[in-house]
Image (tube, rainbow, N blue to C red):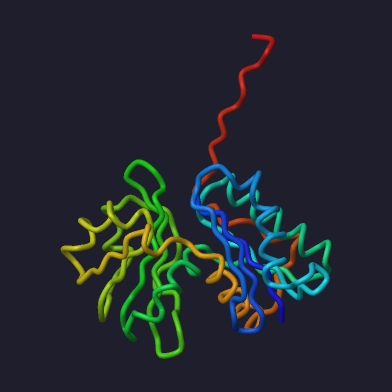
Amino acid sequence: MILLALETATSTCGVAVLDDDTVVAEAHLRRPRVHAERLTPLVEDVLDHADATPAALDAVAASMGPGSYTGLRIGVSTAKGWALSTDAAFVGVPTLAAYAAQLRPVAAPGDVVCALLDARRDEVYAGAYRRTTDGLDEHASPTALPVDDLPGWVGTVDGRLWLVGDGAPKSRAALGDAFTCTLIPADERPPSAGWVARCGRRQLAMHGPDDMATVEPLYVKDVHATPAPSPFD
């Protein structure tokens, strides 16, 4: 299987190509507001480095949120476009699950990995996943909530609580009194298109592709757009 994966839910603009179980090419830009301009050229470059033609794609995976409203719209629409144009399957991957999966190699069974993205003010986007012998299972459903509410949302943790993401530093104080925590700085472990690819392949094997006509990004919070001023006022 040749799978193309996109990660655009944060300031990371990332693309990866998975060949069976191996990420054979991957590239990321860690810069805000470049997704619209740079994503498609990045896809073309990564496919070229992977020696993969668009016609060879079997599936396209996209990070589905929560995260940046604009980034998600760009990433999901781009992924659907590549899937439609190449007749490839489409699979949407929860952003926080793919982020938490990066810690699967270091977390022990019973540990919980909490992926946290800054949602501004005192809120974070949060998803918690318990390490099992086979991988990660959802421990607490992805949501947006104030950092002070995190301990009750996390619930019981048998082992260590791992915190990863740009929302982790402001969440540590609220969680540190209730749990044994280890914080992984976001600049050391940023979001990765390669892990979106790995999670996408797993989802396809377990559940099959998503319906492109109905699947939508997981925004979690209501989108508040500011209308442009009328030129007639």
* x 23%, y 69%: residue: 181
Q: Which quadrant of the view contains residue 129?
A: bottom left
Q: Which quadrant of the view contains residue 204?
A: bottom right
Residue 102 x %, y %? 44, 72
Pick the residue in front: 206 or 13: 13
6 with respect to 156 (left or right): right
Give the position of the C terminus as an image quadrant. Answer: top right
203 with respect to 152 (left or right): right
Q: Which quadrant of the view contains residue 121?
A: top left
Give the position of the N terminus as an image quadrant. Answer: bottom right
Question: Residue lying furthest left in this view?
Answer: 177
Does residue 179 sit above or below 71 in this rendering? below
* x 51%, y 54%: residue: 12
Question: Residue lying furthest top in this view?
Answer: 233
Pick the residue in front: 43 or 92: 43
Does residue 103 sit above or below 153 in this rendering? below
Residue 24 x %, y %? 62, 76
Decide if residue 167 is in sight here. yes
Does residue 148 sit above or below 184 in this rendering? above
Residue 230 x %, y %? 66, 16
* x 31%, y 79%: residue: 111
164 with respect to 44 (left or right): left
